[in-house]
Amino acid sequence: MVSDRMAAVLARLQGPGRSDPGRLGAGVLGVDGLSVTVTPQSAGPTGEVLWSSSALSRRFDDLQFTLGCGPALDAARSGLPVLEPDLRQVQPQRWGTLPAEAELLPVRAVFCFPLGIGAIRLGALTAVRTAPGVLGDPQTRDALGLAVALTAHYLDRWEPPQTLYRAVVHQAVGMLSVQLALPLADALLRLRAYAYRSGRPVNDVSHDIVTRQLRLDTEDKD
């Protein structure tokens, strides 16, 4: 059973405006950021951020997207929570450079809860903290309750967002596919690799490609 404070947050999902939990949910869970992402299976090859409560959450989501791995993707694909109270303790073979890169954001602890029912995989609810430490049992129950409520909410009342957070990435991947004569999946990998090498967010690199300030085929020849 969720706490009274989380019950009040969940009530917002059913209210007239049906607003997302956002900062209120993060406050109840005692974390520094909360976000919901849909998986690539649900949103094409790039995936999509539905909402986030803070810039820190967005930066962590962008990092996972750039590297193509991370706890949110694992939770969404496996259907099981992924709870990492200290990213410094994660072995390199699991998520490569993600733990070290996350610490620079700074994110030290991350807790991801899948959104889905049975074989249906929608995405993941991700909570991040700047300090290491476990998520307490009451907060874990609240997070699980929030994930269940969000799953029901999106299955029953799904309305695609009017503006996609990664709309420019979708455009850039399509342009790269044509310019480099690559399948979409390979074009996305090239985009991610360039963003990581340059130390820039994927959205910023995508913007430069779409506005024709950057061509990766030209960059690769330099």
Image: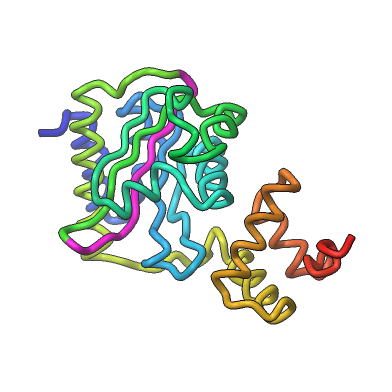
Q: Residue 201, percent across and down?
A: 66, 49
Residue at screen point 43% across, 39% down: 94
Tell me the chief SS of the magenta region.
strand
209 versus 109 height, above or below? below
- State the residue at coordinates (72%, 43%): 199
Q: Is residue 130 left or right of residue 197?
A: left
Q: Check if residue 126 falls in the magenta segment.
A: yes
- Can you see residue 15? no
Q: Position of residue 133 (x, y in %)?
A: 37, 18
Residue 63, placed above or below residue 132: below
Residue 38, image x and y in percent?
A: 39, 58
Instruction: Examine the structure image and report whether residue 221 is included in the region drawn in magenta.
Output: no
Query: Looking at the picture, does residue 133 appear above or below residue 18?
Result: above
The residue lying at 47 percent from left, 61 percent from top is 47
Q: How many marks?
A: 0
Provide the residue span drawn in magenta.
Answer: 119-131
Q: Point out the image quarter for the N terminus.
A: top left
